[in-house]
Amino acid sequence: MTKINMEKTYHTKDKQEVVILSIAGRDARCPVIGYIGDADQLDRWTLEGEHWFSSNNNLIEVKPRIKRSVWLNIDRDSLHCRAYLTKKEANEPPYFIDRIACIKIDLDFEEGEGL
């Protein structure tokens, strides 16, 4: 299981924001200390992100969202497609020789989605 890292962002199972203050608390079983949502009371977790009392408050890593546009060249036989970061790149030889379409696709996904 992955250990909690101060460099990452987390939320609870029901997507409440979590602010991690320390991973070096004095409670050996639950050394991770932080807040859930806008609560004033501190909470504790294990280094694996398990909440001291309720599994609904276990930590789940928030992966960054990737947003970008790509240009997809579709070949005549439709067996080959290739994505380019710019339309100019998609139009450079030899990439467009058997192309029947060049489609702009706007992507919005969570890092690691589908893997």
Image (tube, helix red, strand yellow):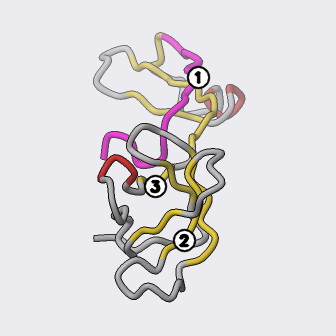
**Which residue is located at x 37 percent, y 62 percent?**
51
Percent coordinates x, y for residue 2 in the rendering: 35, 70
Q: Along the line of sight, which residue is nearer the eye, 23 or 52?
A: 52
Q: CA distance from mark 3 to mark 2?
A: 16 Å
Q: Amino acid at mark 2?
A: Ile
Which residue corresponds to the image point at 66% horizontal and 54% vertical from the top-left?
40
* Mark 1 or 3, nearer chain start: 3
Question: Label 3: which residue?
Answer: 61
Q: Is residue 82 magenta?
A: no
Tell which circle, 2 or 1, labels the residue nearer the N-terminal end: 2
39 on left or right of 28: right
- Please provide the residue range marked out in magenta: 101-115
Tell me the SS state at disc 3. strand
Q: Position of residue 115 (x, y in %)?
A: 30, 47
User: Which marked residue is nearer to the observer: mark 1 or mark 3?
Assistant: 3
Name the quadrant containing residue 107: top right
Is residue 73 positioned above or below 12 on the image?
above
Please state, as top left, top right, bottom left or bottom right, where the N terminus lies in the image: bottom left
Cβ atoms at labels 2 and 1 below 8 Å apart: no
Q: Position of residue 92 (x, y in %)?
A: 65, 32
The reply, left or right, for residue 86 in relation to residue 33 is right
Q: Mostly what secondary structure, the magenta segment?
A: strand
Instruction: Quickly name the residue at label 2.
Output: 33
Q: Which mark is residue 106?
A: 1
Percent x, y of residue 87: 68, 26
Q: Amino acid at mark 1?
A: Asp
